[in-house]
Amino acid sequence: MKAKTLRFRMMLLFTTVVGVLLAGSYLAFWGLLSHEIPTQLNRQLLETSRPLIADIITEPNAQDIKRLDIPGEFFELLDATGGILQYSRNLTTPIALNGMSLPISRPTFGIGTIGNTQTLRVALIPFQQGSRSRVLVVAIPTLGTSRVLDSFGSIALLLFPLSLLLTAGISAFYVGRSLAPVTALTQHAALMAKRVTNRQGFWTPLPVSSPHDELGLLAETFNHLLRGVDSAVGQLRQFVTDASHELRTPLAVLHGETELLLSKPRSAEEYRRTLVLFDDEFKKLTRIVEGLFTLSMADAGQLHLLSEPLYINEVLEEACALVTSRARAKNIAILRELSREVAYCGDEAFLHQLFLIFLDNAIKYSPECTQVRVSLVEQDGTIQARFEDQGIGISSEHLAFIFERFYRAAPPTGVEAHSGGLGLAIAQAIVRTQGGVIECHSTLGVGSTFTVVLPTASPETNLKSKPEQKLMLG
């Protein structure tokens, strides 16, 4: 089980790599040393032979080789057939050449022995003594050089396992320290996983040991991710709470009216009034469910809109006509500035719903005997639909949250409280899908102005021409 840990695998990897490098280095050094030592010995033999050959050539009858008695150096003078003409005084037996052939023009080198007990490095150097060919044999013992190679091999065999053990220990210590932040991150993440159902939030910052290395950047990235997840989970919980609250009210009305209707026989008029009430509540439920469905499609990136040519001023005019009766009930005048035709490619049903959302809100939150101004202009490659009311307005601290689902703002003094819904959230989803934005300017107690800014050419990635991809809004 331990072999599967990252620490063990990294330690094994480091040790293997260092072992291969050390083995390669030792072998390369051994090969270099094994090559260089004979080369140096050959050079020494040649340097030793030069003055001797010069003396032999200048004094052919001298017996210089017989008089030589240099410790650690042996000499022989051979004729062309290999016969020994002279040998140094420290030679008790001839040098065994072990199969070395006599050279003709260039020196040759090899290994010889004396009495099968002492190994020598031998150089056979040919030269001319007058008209006769001679070969000078120069030899030196290889015992010292062999000891050097043997000592190096013994030291290498000792240092290699010690180096591996030292590398394993250092790598285990370093890898352990390097992985300590990962262990801390794992423990901290496990703790947060146990607290994920905590309603007060599960996220606390992960420890960052060093903010500039890879692990520190990983921890910072996880902190950013978990902060977003915590916020999303909180928003989801709030959304579910608000949605259940919105659905509970019409369901409670339906349940209460049903129990009251079934408590005793009723007249036909009473049944009719109850059914009308049922119809109103069912419409509320339908709007909520359809709104939630539309937003879920938008969140999943599946809110596909048709791209069909239309005149956007006509769509806006139709929306204004639909809310006229509600505006008259509160004596609110809808002033239109829609005389100019504005061509556009988009989804008529979604645009119709979009404009109704702003008109409904303007009428709902405006006092009686006021005005709602609706205008449509083309400016800087965009189409801008503006809705201005003289309603209660929105305070600055709530302005950034009005597009959140079921957002509820505390009402100003003297104004009836109202709950937020899905309208503005749906409007924002529709506009974003068409590549536009919604701008809002509001003054508390004076009124609000919502401006829908749509690009003249809708993005092809969001607009589809297949009718089956269009959402049914009811």
Image (cartoon, rainbow, N blue to C red):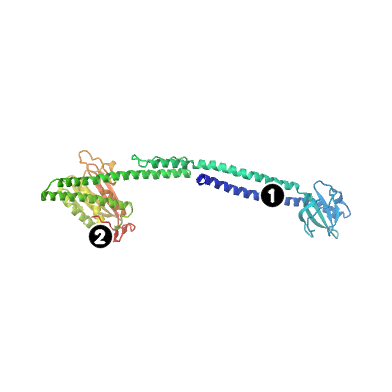
User: How many circles with numbers are drawn on the protein?
Assistant: 2
Q: Can see residue 236?
A: yes
Image-based side of 245 in relation to 112, left or right: left
Q: Residues within 10 Å of mark 2 (few under 14, many from 20)?
A: some
Viewer-proximal residue among 94 and 469? 94
Question: Residue 150 appears at what percent x and percent y?
Answer: 70, 47
Q: In the image as oriented, which residue stretches furthest toward the top?
A: 413
Residue 463: name its quadrant.
bottom left
Disc 1 packing (10 Å; few <14; some 14–19; many ≥20) = some
Residue drawn where x is 57% and y is 46% of the image: 15
User: 422 left or right of 192?
Assistant: left
Image coords of residue 65 (percent x, y): 85, 51
The residue carrying mark 1 is 33
Residue 400 appears in the picture as rendered: no
Instruction: Mark 1 vs mark 2: give the one in front.
Output: 1
- Report, in whole angstroms, how far the alpha carbon at label 1 lies from the one at label 2: 91 Å
Which residue is labeled 2 in the image? Answer: 310
Label 1 with label 2: CB-CB less than 8 Å: no
Query: In the rendered structure, which amino acid carries the disc numbered 2?
Result: Leu
Q: Where is residue 106 shown, x and y percent of the image? A: 77, 58
Q: Please, what secondary structure does the residue beneath circle 2 have?
A: strand
Going by the numbered disc 1, the residue's amino acid type is: Leu
Residue 459 x/y as whole percent: 33, 57
Q: Is residue 307 above or below residue 277?
A: below
Q: What element carries label 1?
A: helix
Circle number at residue 325 = none
Q: Nearer the viewer, residue 472 or 438?
A: 472
**Mark closest to the chain's N terminus, 1 or 2:** 1
Give the camera-side residue of 445 and 459.
459
In the image: residue 367, left or right of residue 158: left
